[in-house]
Image: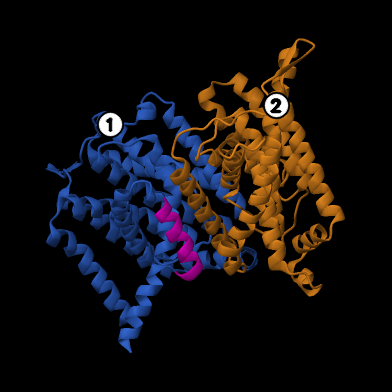
Amino acid sequence: MKHKLLSGAAITFLLTAPALLNDPFITHLSIRAATYAIVVMGLTLFVGYTGQISLGHAAFFGLAAYISGILSKLGVPYALAALSATVATGVVGALVGLVVLRTSGHYLALASIAVAIIIQTLIKNAEITGGPSGLTAIPSPGIFGFELAGGLDYYYYVLAFLALGLLILHRIVGSRTGDAMQAIANNELAAQSLGIPVFRYKVMSFTISVLFAALAGTLLGHYDGFVDPDRLGTNSSILFLIMAFVGGIGSLPGALLGAFSLTIMEEYAQEFGQYNVLAYGLMLALVILFMPKGLIALVQRVLGREGK
Amino acid sequence: MTEIFQQLLYGLSVGSTYALIALGITLVYRGMDLINFAQGELFMAGAFLGYVFHVDMGLSIWLALPCAMASALAFGALLERVFLRRIENASPLTLFMMTVALFILLRSVAQLIFGSSAYRFPPVSESVVRVAQMQISVQHLLVIGVSLLMMAALYWLFTKTSIGLSARAVAQDKTTARMMGINVSRINAFTYALSALLGTVAGIVYAPIAVLSFDMGNLIMLKGFTAALLGGLGLVSGAVFGGYLLGIIEQFGTLALSSAYKDMVSFSILLLVILLKPNGLLGKKVVKKV
C-alpha cells in the first residue's frame, strides 16, 4: 500500500510537474535529469544488484552520443542513427565486459577506468569526432515527420524511455536472473558453487547497464546538439555513481531520486561557483556515513511513519 | 648510448614517485582491505602542504619537508577518524565509495584554496652534473635519493618497531590481531596516516620536476595503481618494482609514440596486467576459498 502510494505520487509528479510549472529552465533540467536517471537505473542493476563496480560508464554514454551524432550528420535518419548507436555501443560494452569482467572487485574498478580513458583518448585524437573541441551541430531528432526540438515534447519523449526502462529492469530484478545477480552480489564464490554461471550473469548485467547508458547518451546528445570528450571522463562516471549511491544503491526508485535531486542540486549549486563539486563530495560522504541506504530510505521512513 | 642512460635516469626518477604512491596504496590495501581512490589527492595535498611551508612561510626545504610530513601524519589520521572509522566494517564497495568522496572533497577544497592556476615549486637545486657527456640534473637524483631513503625508513618501521609489527599482524589477520590485544582502529589510523605521509613526500619531491595544481592527483593515482598492479597488488616489493618499471616503460614508450597517446601507454599496461597476470609480475597465484 505504502509502496503503491509512493510510486503513484512519483509518477504523477514526473508527469505533471514540468508541464504545470511550464518554465523552460525547469523543463531543461527535467530532460537532463531524466536522461541521467536512465544511466543510473542501468548502473543500479550492475552495481546495486550484481554488486560490481564501474567507473567507466560515462565512456559508453558519450560513445553512443558520438556515434549517433556522426551518423545523423552523415544523413542517416534519427531513429536509425540512435538505434544503431545504442546497439553498437552495447556490442562494444559486451566485448569490454567479456574482457574486464574476468576480474572482479578492485581490479574491475581500475580496468573500467582504463577502458574509459582509452576510449576517451581515441575519440579526442580522431578527425571525424571533431577532436578535443567536440562534435557540434548534431541535428535534433525527428520521428515520422515530427520534429522534437526540445521543450516539453522532448521531456515526454525521454520520459517514455525512462518508463520503458524501469519496466524492463523491474522485470529483470524480479526474475530468476535477478535472483542470480543478487546471489553474486552477496557472495560470488558461494553463488558459483551453487551452480550459477557467475561470469555469464556479470557480462549480461554489464551489457544491459551499458545499453541503458548508450540509450541515454543518444537522447542527451541530440537534445544538447553537441558532445565533447569531457563527457566521457572519469568525473562524469563518478557523478553517475554518486547519483546511484545518494539515491539509494540497489533501489530503482532510489536511482530516479538520486538522478533528479542531484541534477537539480547541480544547477542551483552552480550559482556558488566552484562549490558545486564540493557539494557532491559532501553529499556522498554524508549519505555513506549517516544514511547508507540513501535518500530513498528517508522517504520510505517518512511515509511509513504517516502510515501508522 | 648516453641518450639511453639519460632517459633511463628520467624514467627512474618519475618511477620512484610512482613507487612511493604505489607503496601508499599497498599499505592501505594490505592493512585496511581498502582501495584508496584518494591516494593521488593525498599526494596533491602533500605537495601543497610543502608549498605552504616552503614558499609561503619561507622555511628552508629541509625544514619544510619534516613540517609537511608531520602535518600529513596528523591529517591522514584525522581523515581516517572522521570518514572511515564509522564504516570500518561496511562492504568493500561502500568503503571504496567513501574514498571516492574523499577524492572529490580534497580536490575541490584545494581548488577553493589555491584556485585553478598552476604553481611552480622551486627546485632544491637547479645545478646540473656532467658525467661522461651526460647532463644529470641534481633534482632528478634527489627524487631518487629521497624515495630510497623513505623505503629504507619504511623497512625499519615494519620490521623493528612495535607499531609496525602490530600493523603487519593486522594486515595478516584482523580478528586474531584483535584477540592479541591490538587496537585495530588505532592501527588503521596509523596506516592511513602513513599513506598520507608517503603521498606528501612523493608530492614534494615530484612537484619541482612538474607543476603544482589542484588536479595533479588524478593521473598520478592511476599511475600508482598501475605500478602496484604491475608488481603485484599487496606486495611491498611489488609496489617498488612496479613503480620503477612503469617509470622506465613510460619514458621509453613516450619516445616511441606521439605525446597525445602518452597516458594510453600506462593504461594499456594496466589492462594487459589485469588480463594476463592479475597477480602481477612478482605475485603468486591466490586461491580463493568460500
Residue at 34% across, 79% down: A302
Which range is magenta? A278-293
Total number of numbered discs in the rendering: 2
Q: Tell me where residue A33 sits by quadrant.
A: bottom left
Q: Tell me where residue B192 sits by quadrant.
A: bottom right
Q: Which mark identifies residue A136?
A: 1
Q: Tell me where residue B92 sits by quadrant.
A: bottom right
Residue A249 x/y as whole percent: 45, 64
Q: Nearer the viewer, residue A74 or B156?
A: B156
Q: Is residue A280 magenta?
A: yes
Q: Colour of chain B?
A: orange
Mark 1 and mark 2: Cα distance apart in space: 44 Å
- Element under label 1? loop
Please name which of the two marks, 1 or 2, marks the residue nearer to the observer.
Answer: 2
Q: Colour of chain A?
A: blue
Does residue B123 appear in this view?
yes
Task: Say left or right for A97 vs B168.
Answer: left
**Hey, which residue is sitting farthest bottom in the picture?**
A308
Q: Mark 2, chain letter?
A: B
| Pointer 2 residue | B140
Q: Give, as a three-letter code, the residue at label 1.
A: Thr
